[in-house]
Image (cartoon, rainbow, N blue to C red):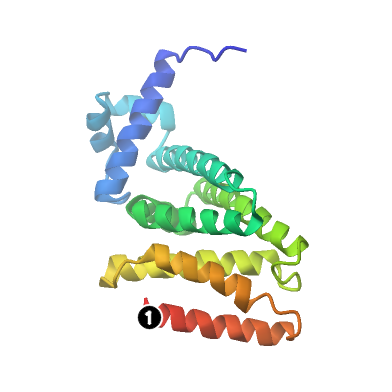
Amino acid sequence: MAASTPTRGDRTRAAVVEAATTAFTETGYTATTMADVAARAGVAEATVFLHFGSKAGLLAAVMRRYYDELAATCERVAGAASDPVERLRLLTLHWATRLRDDWQLTSNFAQQGRFHTDPDLAEQFIACNRQITRIYGGVVADLQQRGILDDTLPTRVIRDVVFGTLEHLVISHTTIGRPDDIEAAAEALVRLLLHGAGGAARAPADRLTRIEDKLDDLLARA
């Protein structure tokens, strides 16, 4: 079936979302006004309210577009390798670099998604994040089923170790100027998962302790 031709309303919405994405990246969500977005998009401020209802509604639209595109690229990255370990490495590296490169925008998503008073925005933030964590969790679960990663550790724990560590490193770089070597950190995390969490002879609690110790060392050297 051929794709439908975008309507004038579709084009207006796309232009406003693009303008808002740029504004939120450059000046942040709080400092950006609907008038700022309207001026960037070349439309009346009332038009922005007509299509999105509120500033929170506009942020939700920006968030949906961003995460839909990110999920699509993550799927392509994960599908580019037949080897499951290489799949984990490529996906971890892709997530790490996107987190670093898009931090000025995605930190707005995290801040407003967690603390905004609009419950719909909070639900949107959770749903968008699940798009990405579901992909990563699937790659991790596949490695566990193959016996490459320890299947006594919950998949979400392994996933959160990676996501939390990389987020911490990016925050450290952007807020206090620590050296930015996110690619090396991503590679180190993959090695940690494969070699630090894969030994079947140790008790699960001992393995978690070893992972925490290695993470502490990685963060201290970053």
User: Is 162 drawn above or below residue 111 in the view shown?
Assistant: below
Residue under numbered circle 1: 221
The percent position of residue 120, horizontal first and vertical second, equals 54, 45
Residue 76 visible? The answer is yes
Above/below status of 47 relative to 21: above
Q: Residue at x 73, y 86 (%)?
A: 202
Horizontally, residue 191 falls left or right of residue 183, namely right
Label 1 secondary element = helix
Can you name the residue that lies furthest to the front here? Answer: 83
Count of residue discs: 1
Residue 74: x %, y % from top left? 54, 46
| Quarter where residue 138 is shown | bottom right
Quadrant showing the C terminus: bottom left
Of 33 and 80, nearer the camera is: 80
Residue located at (36% from left, 67% from top): 171
Q: Amino acid at mark 1?
A: Arg
- Image quarter of the N terminus: top right
Above or below, comparing residue 116 to residue 5 in the picture: below
> Is residue 116 in view from this perspective?
no
At 62% from the left edge and 50% from the top edge, which residue is drawn? 135
Q: Residue 76 at x, y = what percent?
A: 55, 41
| Position in image of residue 155 (x %, y %) | 68, 64
Q: Residue at x 42, y 43 (%)?
A: 56
How crowded pointer 1 is (Cα within 10 Å; few <14, some 14-19, many 20+) is rated as few
Quarter of the rendering containing residue 200: bottom right
